[in-house]
Amino acid sequence: MKASYDIVDVAGPRGSNPAGLWLPLLLTLAGLPFVLHLASYNLPGRDLYIRAINGELEGYLGMDFVDTWIGAKLAVTGAVAPLFNLAAFQKILQGFFGADFPFFFWSYPPHLLPLILPLGFLPYVPAFIAWTAGTLAGFLAAALPDRGSPARWPTAIALLLAPSTIVNGFSGQNGFATAGLLVGGLRLLDRRPIIAGALFGILTIKPHLGLVLPFVLIALRAWTAIASAIAAAGLLVGLSVVVYGLDPWRGFFLLISPFQWRYSTGMDGTFASMVASVYGAAYQLGAGLEASLALQAVAAVPALAAALWVLRRSEDASARILAVVAAVFLSTPYVMYYDLTSLTAALALYLGRPRSLGAVGFTTVALAWVAAPLTRIVDLVGLPIIPLVIASVLMLVVRQAVARVPPGGGVGDVDLVRDA
């Protein structure tokens, strides 16, 4: 008998509680990602913990939060120049964390500084807790079904057990924040276009995660959101100039950006194990820099085209959001494993309503759900399959959209967030 993984069969008719599938799936997978995440840190020889901070404690979680916290501390003083000077930044890190602290560098544009400034008033541990809790709340707000939905609590449990939640919770990275901005913006695009645009404008702190958004917004004729995004980004940039001057921007464009490009194209072992893009996969398989970038560009075109087709043809709002998020990750060369939190949020919305997946679809979703920790494992062993997993997610959405399009045409213009 052919295996069936039909959420409708398990969960009952549309609108009923889909916990029948969610909880067994997530509880089964929850232990594996945690082990994989620990292994992914140990394989390249990197500690989960900072051994000491000024001798106060044995160790802290959230090593990747260090540069955010240092940036916030400097933002409070107004003396942010060391962020855009590699040697000066490393000296400050070693002053706080010890002479053997590994090399880190500040990689963000200056308009992030006003947003993280409040963290600079806190010691490291309270700041880490505030950062993680605050950004997790934004992530959950973006990914949970609307209030009153029977899927809300099962989805909340699934998200708290999600591999990407574990990854970001331990590392202190910004995946919760970017997921809240990207997926939250997509969900609010029709109901609250000004807020949605503002979220997209803030997402310019990591501009590579918004490469497809201009195409999406223009295709949807979301002019209010476009204006709001431009205004929000402009206000943040202007605020950073007023408070810190133009020198940080000069340092960002003349030093940090070129260094980050050299660093990301160097693809050393540790960095290579963190990359989840088409470019990263091709490079690891020996394609070379130019060929890898060319393959990335080639992959971006059909990915964006597929997402735009789904936007135009599908009435399923959560499917449209998932298509856009998948296209984001297939279109940019700089996708890190912790960025895949946005994929988790979009998957949660997609699976928060009953739908038939089939065996292939179920497998695709399961692999995508564990993609964040799985990235480091498969990359380290030379099997960078995560871009294929993301492409399979996009293909799944396209196939289901095709199956639902009536013969002879599509559904015309639809609201992006309806039914999400």
Image (cartoon, rainbow, N blue to C red):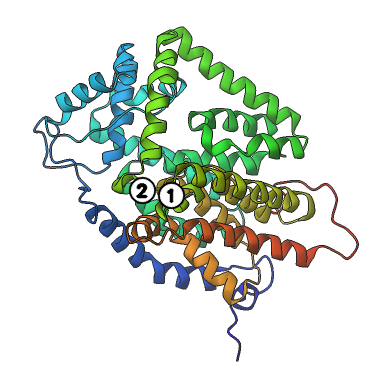
In this view, the mark in front (2 or 1):
1
Q: Residues within 10 Å of mark 1 (few under 14, many from 20)?
A: many
Instruction: Name the kind of residue labelled 2 in the image.
Output: Ala
Vertical arrangement, residue 259 with respect to residue 219, above or below: above
Disc 2 versus disc 1: distance between alpha carbons? 9 Å
374 is higher (above) or lower (below) than 177: below
Instruction: Residue at 44%, 47% (x, y): give it.
Output: 288
Q: In the figure, residue 109 lies in which quadrant?
A: top left
> Residue at the location (31% across, 11% down)?
79
Q: Residues within 10 Å of mark 2 (few under 14, many from 20)?
A: many
How many marks overall? Answer: 2
Q: Say if residue 150 shows up in the picture.
A: no
What residue do we see at 20% from left, 36% from top?
Answer: 102
Read off the residue under disc 2: 272
What is the quadrant of the N terminus in the image? bottom right
Mark 1 = which residue? 283
Horizontally, is 31 left or right of 419 in the view? left
SS type, badge 2: helix
Q: Amino acid at mark 1?
A: Tyr
